[in-house]
């Protein structure tokens, strides 16, 4: 009996002491939808995780789980992280939205950050980047560079984020080239190199000479390289390994400053639920170097557009703009409000095909 | 809608390319299952083959060596499965699943320094006279040699199982291992050889993805192709000809639905997107509806002393 008591006492002291150690270090968890080596979306989130480690050193410990399926599995992963003592968890894919809220309900003391979603709670923040600002720059380059006037667009999953990208690219391609048409293919996946390559090949076979992708791997660029006279853009990451070939520019996600700020807030105890949506100006969306394949005057035009978006002088969704069915969306000079943009589920006038439900 | 932008010739050409990796992997798995072993590790062996093939092709500059290494890599991983299930009598389902997880991890490790590297291109086989036939020539006779290897393999597997003594022994082992053992056939040896062959085929299928179809190395790049190959074997009721048909049907629907999307056909994209799975399963299920044709001892552990 006495022995058992000593044992329990020892166990309690041990438990308390490890608890104290754990409190010194802030533990941050990351849930990824793809592998860290995808060269795109997940790769950039992991770069930001490494930046957090660099910045805080011994103060912070990070853990991550890669290739987590969107759905119930994500909730299991987050619960496990929370039980292992994570103070802050970043869920980095749209499809983790409901699992994040469920996990947050069960662990009210753990802070959650959900990327690209729109549901928040007292301990759930959302954050996203205004990628459509980058898409406007891409659309301009695409519209100027195309000779066949057919631009192929590889869509991943039909959510507002992706629809926004298509609209922003189309509006700006059309602005510089009235003859331009978009061919859109949905692959229903964020990361499937074989399917992405297939989609790119199909678009090229059907006459596209510019490929814009909203999927995470470099496979479409490889397909463009093989076809020869086709250009494309890096997605989420710079994908600079193709810059001597088809890649003429890119949209780069830079999460590091945001992640560092949020981890700092947790350490300071000042963290509160918020909705962050930053664009080119604060550097969350970067435009990768425009290569020499793009003539100087087009490059200058694209950079001027980028500058005017960054300064806040120009909004990529500025009227007059009509919806696909011809009804008026934005009047002359009017700009889109964030609410409409966040829930965008319609194409603008001129795009063919329907938005999948 | 603009259906004229779809070119049937190009469509057939790309469906052959899209089907080849699952065709080769499924043929290998079919032989394994005909020998009475259920190896669920196809995905793991495919991705290991993909990375081994890629690394060796980049290092040597020869896609041929790459494919050889892919077959070796897939077979090496299959050997682990073989030793576990045939020698240590481990559970086949659990071992197979473990093999998939192991293969995914191992390939990520091996491929770390090969992200974004471009492989040497695999030569297209320009068959002299046939390739010059207008229309058909370009469609049927101007592919890389792995496409023809897939067709040849189908024929070889069919002939082996149907018309050779060794094929008969392999089937006997799969139908009733005890009886085959009583007749003096080496059940474990036959099964090990079948498992190695299955691994080599899965490896080749994986390498086709990383060296020809995509072509580059990214982690997790098979993304489910191995599971499709596995399902295909069952739906094709363990027959080589039907595996070929199923693979081409699946590849064809995959390419066709993308083409229809790009052409702006007014069918909801969701239906188009699931059509490859739906059509392939439907057709093969209807064809094999008569009776259960699974090998009698599929998935059962065999030990001669029992």
Image (tube, helix red, strand yellow):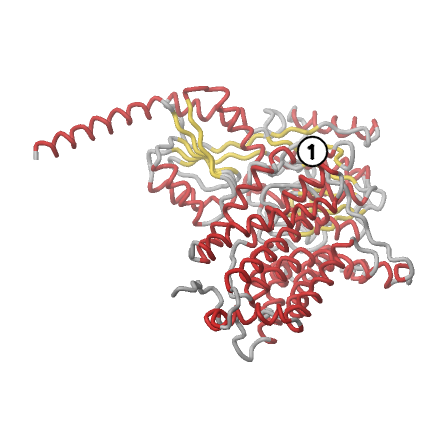
The vertical placement of A97 against B141, above or below, is above
Q: Nearer the viewer, residue B262 or B206?
A: B206
Q: Is residue B149 visible?
A: yes
x, y percentage for residue B70? 65, 47
To which residue does mark 1 refer? A250
Residue located at (65% from left, 50% from top): B71
Q: Is residue A348 visible?
A: no
Residue located at (52% from left, 71% from top): B294
Count of numbered badges drawn on the protein: 1
- Label 1 secondary element: strand
The vertical placement of A149 against A265, above or below, is below
Q: Quadrant of residue B125?
A: bottom right
x, y percentage for residue A190? 59, 46
Q: In the picture, which quadrant includes the N terminus of chain A?
A: top left
Q: Quadrant of residue A306?
A: top right
| Relative horizontal placement of residue A108, taking residue B147 as reference (left or right) | left
Q: Residue furthest left?
A: A1
Q: In the picture, which quadrant includes the C terminus of chain A?
A: bottom right
| Relative horizontal placement of residue A303, taking residue B301 as reference (left or right) | right
x, y percentage for residue B192? 54, 58
Chain identity of mark 1: A
Q: Nearer the viewer, residue A279 or A155?
A: A155
x, y percentage for residue B179? 48, 73
Q: Residue furthest bottom?
A: B290
Residue located at (76% from left, 39% from top): B61
Q: Residues within 10 Å of mark 1 (few under 14, many from 20)?
A: many
């Amino acid at each position: 009996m006495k022995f058992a008591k000593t044992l329990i006492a020892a166990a309690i002291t041990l438990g308390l002491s490890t608890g104290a150690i754990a409190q010194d270090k802030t533990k941050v968890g990351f849930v990824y939808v793809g592998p860290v080596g995808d060269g795109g979306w997940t790769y950039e989130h992991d770069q930001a995780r490494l930046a957090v480690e660099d910045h805080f050193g011994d103060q912070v410990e990070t853990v991550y789980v890669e290739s987590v399926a969107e759905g119930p599995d994500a909730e299991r992963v987050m619960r496990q992280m929370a039980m292992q003592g994570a103070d802050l968890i970043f869920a980095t894919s749209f499809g983790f939205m409901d699992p994040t809220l469920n996990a947050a309900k069960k662990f009210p003391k753990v802070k959650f950050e959900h990327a690209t979603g729109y549901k928040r709670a007292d301990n759930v923040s959302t954050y996203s980047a205004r990628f459509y600002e980058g898409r406007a720059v891409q659309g301009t380059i695409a519209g100027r560079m195309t000779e066949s006037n057919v631009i192929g667009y590889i869509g991943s999953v039909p959510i507002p984020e992706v629809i926004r990208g298509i609209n922003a690219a189309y509006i700006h391609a059309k602005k510089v080239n009235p003859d331009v048409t978009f061919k859109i293919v949905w692959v229903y996946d964020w990361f499937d190199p074989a399917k992405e390559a297939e989609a790119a090949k199909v678009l090229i076979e059907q006459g596209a000479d510019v490929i814009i992708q909203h999927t995470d791997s470099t496979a479409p660029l490889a397909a463009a390289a093989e076809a020869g006279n086709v250009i494309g853009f890096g997605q989420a990451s710079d994908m600079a390994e193709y810059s001597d070939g088809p890649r003429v520019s890119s949209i780069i996600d830079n999460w590091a400053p945001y992640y560092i700020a949020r981890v700092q807030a947790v350490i300071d105890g000042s963290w509160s639920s918020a909705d962050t949506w930053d664009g080119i100006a604060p550097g969350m969306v970067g435009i990768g170097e425009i290569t020499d394949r793009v003539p100087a005057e087009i490059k200058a035009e694209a950079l001027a557009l980028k500058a005017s978006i960054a300064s806040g002088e120009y909004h990529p969704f500025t009227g007059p703009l009509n919806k696909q069915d011809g009804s008026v969306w934005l009047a002359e000079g009017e700009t889109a409000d964030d609410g409409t943009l966040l829930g965008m589920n319609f194409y603008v006038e001129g795009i063919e095909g329907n938005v999948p439900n | 809608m603009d259906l004229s932008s779809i070119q049937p010739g190009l469509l057939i050409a790309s469906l052959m390319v899209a089907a080849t990796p699952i065709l080769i992997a499924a043929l290998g798995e079919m032989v394994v299952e005909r020998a009475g072993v259920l190896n669920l590790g196809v995905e793991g062996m495919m991705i290991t083959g993909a990375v081994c093939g890629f690394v060796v092709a980049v290092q040597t500059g020869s896609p041929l060596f790459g494919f050889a290494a892919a077959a070796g890599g897939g077979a090496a991983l299959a050997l682990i499965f073989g030793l576990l299930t045939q020698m240590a009598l481990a559970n086949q389902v659990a071992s197979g699943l473990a093999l998939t997880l192991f293969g995914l991890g191992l390939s990520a490790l091996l491929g770390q320094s090969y992200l974004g590297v471009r492989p040497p291109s695999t030569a297209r086989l320009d068959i002299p006279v046939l390739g010059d036939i207008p229309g058909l020539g370009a469609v049927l006779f101007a592919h890389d040699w792995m496409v023809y290897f897939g067709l040849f393999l189908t024929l070889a597997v069919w002939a082996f199982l149907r018309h050779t003594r060794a094929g008969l022994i392999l089937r006997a082992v799969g139908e009733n291992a005890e009886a085959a053992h009583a007749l003096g056939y080496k059940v474990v040896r036959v099964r090990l050889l079948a498992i190695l062959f299955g691994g080599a085929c899965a490896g080749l299928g994986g390498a086709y993805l990383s060296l020809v179809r995509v072509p580059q190395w990214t982690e997790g790049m098979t993304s489910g192709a191995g599971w499709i190959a596995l399902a295909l074997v069952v739906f094709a009721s363990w027959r080589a000809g039907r595996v070929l048909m199923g693979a081409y049907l699946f590849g064809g629907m995959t390419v066709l639905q993308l083409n229809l999307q790009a052409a702006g056909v007014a069918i909801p994209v969701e239906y188009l997107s699931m059509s490859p799975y739906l059509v392939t399963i439907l057709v093969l299920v209807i064809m094999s509806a008569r009776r259960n044709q699974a090998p009698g001892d599929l998935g059962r552990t065999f030990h001669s002393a029992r």
